[in-house]
Image: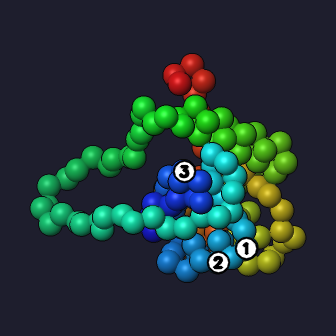
């Protein structure tokens, strides 16, 4: 996976994760990279600092990226919730068979269709390795936000 800081033509900043370097260009060319705040497809990579890996050998807990206090926070949450609702209302739920079904669609063994479900970390890594294009489905706990 590769992480990019992105910015739209209205200066909304957000992050994007892609399966490889060429996936961003491919998705942008097909109009799939959109701003989660204003939904424009006029999106470019923003300047970002390079990721520097550490060389110490101690075991570290896995960390996740978090955000709080951004002036557009509520709009972003609403856009993420709208995305989740759109996917769950228009795509087929395949449960824990997501990796198998996504791979079948990617390799054109079945007709293309929207799907959503769950996968283990190992299944996700294998999908990335196979070049299957997918994205995490945002989850928002209403009682905590």
Relative image position of residue 53 (x, y in whole percent): 23, 66
Q: Residue at x 31, y 64 (%)?
A: 49
Q: Secondary structure at mark 2?
A: helix
Helix, strand or loop at label 1? It is loop
Q: Position of residue 120 (x, y in %)?
A: 53, 53
Q: Residues within 10 Å of mark 1 (few under 14, many from 20)?
A: few
Q: Are marks 1 and 3 in contact (CB under 8 Å)?
A: no
Question: Taking the image as drawn, is residue 4 in sight?
Answer: no
Report which residue position mark 3 lands on. Answer: 12
In the image: residue 67, left or right of residue 111 = left
For the question of whether residue 72 can be seen, the reply is: yes
Q: Is residue 31 left or right of residue 51?
A: right
* Nearer to us in this view, 14 or 80: 14
Residue extending furthest top?
143
Whether the residues at callouts 2 and 1 have beta carbons within 8 Å, the answer is yes
Residue situated in front as seen by the camera: 136 or 93: 136
Residue sitting at x 65%, y 64%: 42
Q: State how far apart marks 1 and 3 are (Cα).
A: 21 Å
């Amino acid at each position: 996976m590769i992480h990019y800081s992105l910015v739209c033509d209205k200066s909304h900043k957000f992050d994007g994760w892609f399966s490889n370097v060429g996936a961003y260009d491919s998705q942008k060319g097909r109009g799939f990279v959109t701003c989660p705040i204003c939904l424009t497809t006029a999106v470019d990579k923003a300047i970002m600092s390079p990721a520097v890996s550490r060389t110490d050998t101690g075991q570290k807990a896995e960390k996740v990226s978090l955000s709080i206090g951004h002036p557009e926070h509520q709009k972003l949450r609403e856009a993420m919730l709208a995305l989740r609702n759109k996917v769950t209302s228009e795509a087929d739920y395949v449960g824990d068979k997501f990796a198998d079904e996504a791979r079948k669609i990617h390799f054109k063994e079945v007709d293309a269709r929207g799907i959503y479900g769950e996968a283990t970390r190992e299944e996700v890594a294998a999908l990335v390795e196979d070049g299957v294009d997918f994205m995490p489905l945002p989850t928002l706990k209403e009682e905590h936000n």
